Each structure stands twice: as structure tokens, then as C-alpha cells.
Amino acid sequence: MRKIAAQVIIVLFCLWHMFAVGVYAIPRASSDTLSISLRSVLLPVVTPYMLITSQWQLWDLFSPDPLRRVDYYRIEAYQRGAWFPVTTMSANDYNIWRHPFYSKLFVNVFNEFDKNTDGAKERLMQLLVCKPYHLPQGTQIRLVYEYYVVPGNDVDWNRWKPTFANDSGPVTSCPDPPDA
């Protein structure tokens, strides 16, 4: 009987803890009716427990203004007097096992604000499209940053559609083939 009582107490404590953490984590900046109601009624109940157990960290503390930009990297080739898309790289373009590698690579190399890495950007662009897409040597290629920003909390998600913007990146050419 004692063993069952101990197990019940442990389960009840875990449920209470999950409930308290969930309520305490409701973003303070949320202005929807449900969040305001839950915070006003339940926050006074769970706050003493959260403070006593040192569980008081909030996501707002670590990310008060989170990044909401969704990036795509498009490489275009200049052919017959116009720019044509060759490939677009995004999180959905690679299987789940390769996603972390490519995502990190693109974010680190294709960072549009870091002009010191233009040489690395150009070389990566060449590796990704020149040979794989059979582009002739000397074909100009360019990087285009295509992105949209996800709005904050106060939005009608049923009607919201992303508005894309574009920024130009470096331009380079497909290199001579290596000597055989």
C-alpha cells in the first residue's frame, strides 16, 4: 500500500510541476484573451512554487525579441541576357539527416551581413551549381537572399500569408575546369 501511495504522490507531483511550468511560461507579452485570463488567474497560484524551486527563467529573458526571419538562398545564372533561378536552398530541400549540416553551412557561409566571407560564398555557390547543373565555364552566377518575417503574436493566422523580400548577394563566375 505504501508503494502505491508513493507512486501516486510522485505522479501527482510531476503533473503539478508540468502544470506550473506550463502556466509560468505563458509569454508575458501575449495580449490575447486566453493568455491574459490564464495569467491573471493561475500565475498567482504557481509563482511561489516556481520561485522557491528556482524555476523562474522565462524564454523572454533569453529571447526578448526572437528572430522571426525565414531565409531561402537562391542561386541564379545569367544566360541569354537574363537571370534564371538554378536552385533554391531552404530547410525543406534536404532530408532530415542532412538538414542540420546544410542549414548550419548556409547560415554560416551565406550570412548576408558578413562581407568578409564573400570569397567563401562565391566558392560555395560554384560548388553547389556549376558542375552539378552543368553550367559552362564563365557563366555568371549570383546569390539572392529571399526571406520573409513571421509577425508577432497579434495576427490573424488564418489570413496571414508571407510577404517575400529579396536582397542581392555576391556575383561570381563558374571557374575553369581543373586540369586533368
Image (spheres, rainbow, N blue to C red):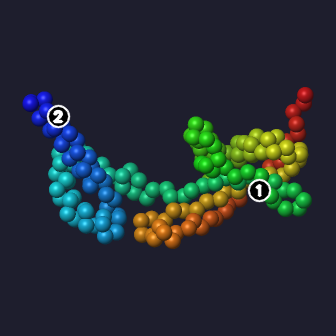
Separation of disc 1 and disc 2 at Cα?
61 Å
> Which residue is identified by label 2?
7
Residue 49 appears in view: yes
Depth order, front residue of 157/137: 157
Q: Is residue 165 above or below residue 23?
A: below
Between residue 34 and residue 79, name the one nearer to us: 34
Mark 1, residue position: 85
Q: Residue at x 63, y 43 (%)?
A: 94
Question: Label for residue 127?
Answer: none
- The C terminus lies in quadrant: top right
Amino acid on which disc 2 is placed: Gln
Give the left or right position of residue 49, taking residue 124 as reference.
Answer: left
- Is residue 108 in view from this perspective? no
Residue located 64% across and 54% down the image? 72
The extreme front residue here reads 1
Residue 73, image x, y percentages? 67, 52
Q: Which of marks 1 and 2 is in front?
A: 2
Which residue occupies the foreground of this view, 94 or 89? 94
Left or right: residue 80 versus residue 87 is right
Q: x%, y% of residue 111?
A: 62, 50
On the rendered structure, is 139 left or right of 103?
right
Q: Which of marks 1 and 2 is nearer the N terminus?
A: 2
Q: Residue at x 22, y 41 (%)?
A: 14
Q: Whole-percent x and y of residue 40?
A: 22, 65
Indicate the position of residue 71 as horizontal and vertical percent values: 60, 55
The local crowd at label 1, few if under 14, some if 14 to 19, many if 20 or more residues have their Cα within 10 Å, is some
User: From what the image shows, is residue 6 above or below residue 81?
Assistant: above
